[in-house]
Image: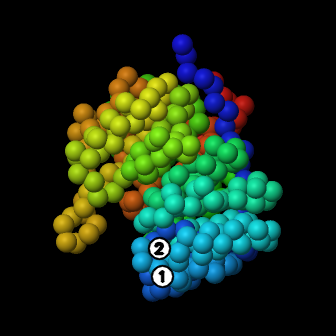
């Protein structure tokens, strides 16, 4: 049986320099120095950043307790003057909040959401529940704090304006072929963390993007095998793998490391697959439109955005 044809999500209203944008903190506590740098660089892009009330809170592992983080996010969603919401950082905490998020606030006033890492399940639900494109892209107290390079700035601003691309270049082809479908995915460990919950996403009839940071080969293989054995990858059309970044001991960030072919698990088997698209825990961190229609040309190592009329 052929995989189902999955319709693309609709794009949020465009965001342009001069617009007000929210800055939310749903995960770990935000470093004040990095936050100040990120907010300044967000303003230099032409946006007016509006902080969530809990943005500078610290409660153990989190930027405030669950109630504070949720209320801060809901207040941003309820503010109709905001054209987009950026997230300050990842870490841990979003999974705890998923059952309590008021999705009607975003449904009433659709707008762009930008983040990655711990935000993966939230962005995925924006696509699944609301049929709205969400952006796997830079966060304020990490990527924007260090300063975006020209390619990153153009990628982000074009995506927010509704004109992504024209393409994203991979480093290697692992399995040749061409596939067209809706782009889904994010951080691998968060994709596997939702399995067995109402927040898990089957990837039938879609193209999976995954990336990860600081994981050894055996854990990558275990997570991918978990996805495959769960049936989540049944009917998958193709796979786009990010730049897998390994931990470098005490120095934290380390060298980029391509997992061996066997570690790509069932996400690669018999499907067009590329490795090395620069999005997520890497520099540069280019913006990908999750929920949008794309073409994966593995032989040319290209991921290309398509118009909905170009669906297979």
Q: Residue furthest left?
A: 249
Say the numbered circle drawn on residue 29: none
- Residue 181, picture quadrant: top right
Left or right: residue 213 compared with residue 32: left
Q: Residues within 10 Å of mark 1 (few under 14, many from 20)?
A: some
Residue that badge 2 annotates: 62
Q: Secondary structure at mark 1?
A: loop
Mark 1–mark 2 Cα distance, whole angstroms, equals 6 Å
**At 63% across and 81% down in the image, what residue appears?**
53
Q: Residue 221, position in %: x, y?
A: 27, 40
Residue that badge 1 annotates: 58
Q: Secondary structure at mark 2?
A: loop
Q: Residue 138, position in %: x, y?
A: 51, 64
- Residue 13, picture quadrant: bottom right
**At 46% across and 26% down in the image, what residue appears?**
234
**At 42% across and 73% down in the image, what residue appears?**
61
Q: Quadrant of the C terminus?
A: top right
């Amino acid at each position: 049986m052929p995989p189902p044809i999955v319709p693309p999500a609709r794009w949020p209203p465009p965001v342009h320099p001069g617009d007000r944008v929210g800055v939310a903190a749903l995960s770990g506590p935000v470093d004040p120095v990095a936050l100040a740098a990120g907010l300044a660089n967000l303003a230099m892009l032409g946006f007016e950043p509006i902080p969530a009330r809990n943005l500078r809170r610290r409660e153990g592992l989190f930027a405030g307790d669950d109630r504070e983080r949720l209320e801060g996010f809901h207040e941003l969603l309820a503010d109709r003057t905001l054209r987009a919401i950026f997230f300050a950082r990842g870490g841990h905490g979003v999974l705890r909040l998923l059952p309590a998020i008021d999705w009607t606030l975003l449904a009433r006033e659709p707008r762009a959401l930008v983040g990655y890492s711990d935000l993966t399940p939230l962005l995925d639900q924006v696509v699944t529940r609301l049929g709205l494109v969400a952006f796997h892209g830079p966060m304020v107290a990490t990527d924007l704090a260090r300063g975006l390079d020209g390619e990153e700035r153009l990628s982000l601003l074009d995506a927010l304006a509704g004109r992504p691309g024209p393409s994203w270049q991979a480093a290697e082809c692992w399995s040749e072929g061409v596939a067209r479908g809706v782009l889904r995915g994010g951080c691998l460990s968060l994709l596997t963390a939702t399995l067995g919950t109402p927040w898990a996403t089957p990837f039938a009839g879609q193209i999976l993007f995954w990336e990860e940071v600081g994981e050894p080969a055996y854990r990558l293989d275990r997570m991918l095998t978990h996805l495959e054995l769960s049936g989540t990858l049944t009917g998958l059309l193709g796979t786009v793998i990010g730049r897998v970044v390994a931990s470098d001991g005490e120095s934290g960030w380390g060298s980029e490391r391509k997992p061996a072919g066997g570690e790509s698990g069932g996400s690669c088997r018999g499907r067009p697959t590329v490795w090395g698209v620069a999005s997520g825990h890497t520099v540069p961190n280019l913006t990908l439109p999750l929920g949008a229609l794309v073409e994966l040309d593995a032989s040319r190592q290209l991921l290309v955005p398509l118009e909905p009329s170009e669906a297979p």
